[in-house]
Amino acid sequence: MYIELKNINKSFGTYKASDDVSFALPAGSLSAFLGPSGSGKTTILRILAGLETPDSGDIIIDGQRVNDITPAKRGIGFVFQNYALFRYMTVFDNIAFGMKIKKISADRIKKRVGELTELIGLKGLENRYPAQLSGGQKQRVAFARAIAPEPKVLLLDEPFAAIDAKIRKELRQWLKDTIKKLNITSIFVTHDQDEASEVADEILIINKGRVEQSGSPLAVYKKPVTPFVAQFIGENSLINNYDKLKGFYRQEGFSTAVIRPEFISIFKENEQYQNSYTAEPGVVKTVTFRGSHLEIVVILHGIELKAVWPTDRELLIPQEKVGVLVKKMYLIDGGNIREIENEALIADNSVII
């Protein structure tokens, strides 16, 4: 593995920002630290960069323990969420800054800056100042400045946070494509699930200074291994009286259920679909347009559940009566999680020979 953190601990007073964190990432990978604000993800990133010193544990890059190596000598590029460009320097000088510090020759700097402005799509803008650039352009310059000295590792702290939503989506794919082209081992911090899923090869879910789960975006979404991950990933309905729903029974040791929208099927009255006869009567509370689909909040036995409805079907309206079928759920309690399916569906699908 190219990057390894082993048993990293870091406290600020009584607050434990990193709690026995260990993980390993392969060379050339693009990984995301995903978690809520205050979860410790930026602290872990800064420890790796050498901007924070761990209380204990080992930081290993390319087989070398780097705890006692200064940030400047770790071979790490860092992209900050607020760009941190030098406003009185041109695009050229901002990108060249790290190379000048390393006393690289002027000819090599000129060639490298030319390569990078071509790479980031800003060729011809070398003499502009940051105030003359858009947010997306500024972030591209910050990216180019970080990789100009050819670091071993690239770290990005909420790189799209200061950019508007439309440009942010465009930059996600650009970042992924560019990092893959450069084949540089990279980690970025985000609290945006869509961003992490679209960009990263691997996601590390961070909560209260600990790595709750790691894996591909699909694996983490499909198979959460802790109650926190089950609740944090995706849009969920969190309910206590799950045994009111048809096909589900109270299970000892599990007081709460997490139900995702895709676990629910909605049927218009008098519709006949597979398993529609196992649905229960519910009422639509709200309908919200989400672009590719409608988000539906439906009331069933006094319980509010979030579901999705395709825009190409006849639209639902508030107060409309519908059939509701909950197909499965995650049960959680303390540190335990269990996935269960609707027993009515299991019975319906049984074949007796």
Image (cartoon, rainbow, N blue to C red):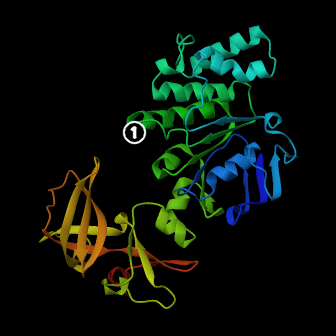
Q: From the viewer's perspective, is 242 left or right of 223?
A: left
Amino acid type for the residue under numbered disc 1: Ala
Residue 1 in view: no
**Foreground residue among 38 and 79:** 38
**Is there any visible trace of residue 264 in the rendered image?**
yes
Residue 2 against residue 321 in the figure, above or below: above
Name the residue that disc number 1 marks. Answer: 165
Give above or below for 93 relative to 221: above
Query: For mark 1, does the 10 Å Cα neighbourhood hold few (<14), some (14 to 19), or many (20 or more) residues?
Result: few
Q: Is residue 125 above or below residue 326?
A: above
> Could you tell me residue 208's position as x and y percent?
61, 64
At a point 50% along the width and 38% down the height, the residue shown is 160
Q: Residue at x 53, y 69 (%)?
A: 228
Residue 216 versus residue 99: which sits nearer the camera? 99
Residue at 48%, 52% in the rendered image: 193
Q: Name the quadrant containing residue 165.
A: top left
> In the image, 57: left or right of 284?
right
Residue 24 at x, y percent in the picture: 74, 53
Identify the residue at image location x=31%, y=86%: 244
Foreground residue among 259 and 267: 259
